[in-house]
Amino acid sequence: MQKQKSRLMRLGALSLSTVALWCVAARAAEPPPSATSPRQESAPEAGPPRLVPEQFSQLFKINDDNPEANVPTAKDRIGNPLEFGYFLQDLLTRAEVAALRKDQAGVIKYYRAVAAAIPEEAKGWSLLCEAYQNAHDPDRAVRACKYAIERKGAELKDYQRYVALMTTKSDELLPEERRDLNEVLGHLDSQPDLAIPAAHLRCETALKMKDAAALAACTTVLAKAAPNDPKTVVFQWSLAVMRGDRDQAAALLGRAEKMGLAAASIDRMSQVSVPGHWWSSPGRGLVGVVIVVVAAVLFGLLLLVMHRRRLASAGRRLAD
């Protein structure tokens, strides 16, 4: 818990790590509280125990019913960086306590306050995106993640979470959503040290968009950069399925199994029907045989009728 409490976000030109160190140093330098200090007062004998941690910040008090209500202004936080660092630490601690209590609504309200306190930074929005994702609220999670990746301090995990949220949507992506995704991927492509994770995200996006050309391009990158990565093989298998190449899909499935891919993943892949010709598609073999037989019978009957007509016509000519 103490390690989690030290997590702070950057403040202007000062990094949050520096603010955290200031907070720790300031706390260590404080004289021990007296016996009459409010922090040492024992809880009333009657009533439930306190569930909200005490505050470090003496200047910026948190309204636990609505933490966003008392967020310091930009002027206040710049003028009181140490107290503002304490304030952020208080919000983060409360969010972590709410998480331990399985109070996801509480986690969200405190992270909303963090994002409101440092809106120009990615970290608060990143935490809020994750909180909304854990609360199974994908629409708000997407918006928070989008704010995160548009701000300074965004990390690879923010991009990964954003793409994952977009590509797991149950409905088709809107044109503007496709545009946003392509812009994000374009930004990642410009980072030379992110070639493999960027290719992974491009492949996931291509699968969502059912874009065989884009899937072929990203699997080509992965085949060179990470040929023995199970993810590479799965994406290659997905491309074979999309193309209806049953033999290639079967070969890649066997390779994935030999590489030790999770049994659950192998089972899911094994149950996928590879699109292709109607006579060879799984589950349609019997129907195909029936159709062929019926067609052959009809063709035979047609030939018999034509033969009898020719015989009848020849008989009439002889009778004439």
Image (cartoon, rainbow, N blue to C red):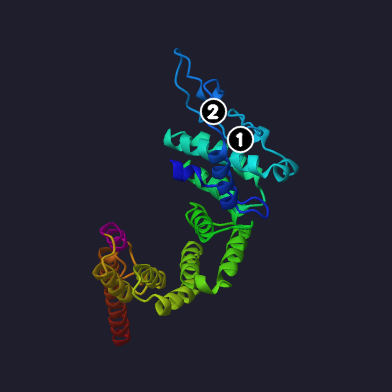
Q: Secondary structure at mark 2?
A: loop
- Sort mark 1 into few (<14), some (14-19) or many (20+) by Cα contacts within 10 Å: some
The residue lying at 38 percent from left, 71 percent from top is 232
Image quarter where the N terminus lies is top left
Where 103 sits versus 134, above or below?
above
| Residue range corresponding to the magenta coloring | 263-271
Secondary structure at badge 1 equals loop
Label ID, residue 77: none
Query: For this view, does 5 lie left or right of residue 261?
Result: right
| Left or right relative to 118: residue 207 | left
**Residue 147 or 169: which is nearer the viewer?**
147
Residue drawn at (47%, 54%) of the image: 168
Magenta stretch: dominant secondary structure: helix
Q: Residue 55 is drawn in which quadrant?
A: top right
Which residue was labeled with disc 2?
33
Q: Is 268 colored magenta in this rendering? A: yes
Q: Is residue 162 above or below residue 32?
A: below
Q: Position of residue 19 (x, y in %)?
A: 60, 48
Q: Would residue 296 appear left or right of 90 to someone viewing this image?
A: left
Q: Is residue 67 visible?
A: yes
Residue 99, given in percent of the width and then of the height, sits at: 45, 37
Residue 84 in the image: state x and y as whole percent. 64, 41
Residues at marks 2 and 1, CA–CA distance in whole angstroms:
15 Å
Horizontal and vertical percent position of residue 24: 54, 43
Which residue lies under the disc numbered 1?
57
Q: Is residue 136 visible?
A: no
Q: Residue at x 27, y 75 (%)?
A: 300
Q: Amino acid at mark 2?
A: Pro
For the residue marked with disc 1, what is the amino acid?
Ser
Q: Is residue 38 above or below residue 138?
A: above
Quarter placement of the C terminus: bottom left
Mark positioned earlier in the residue sequence (2 or 1): 2
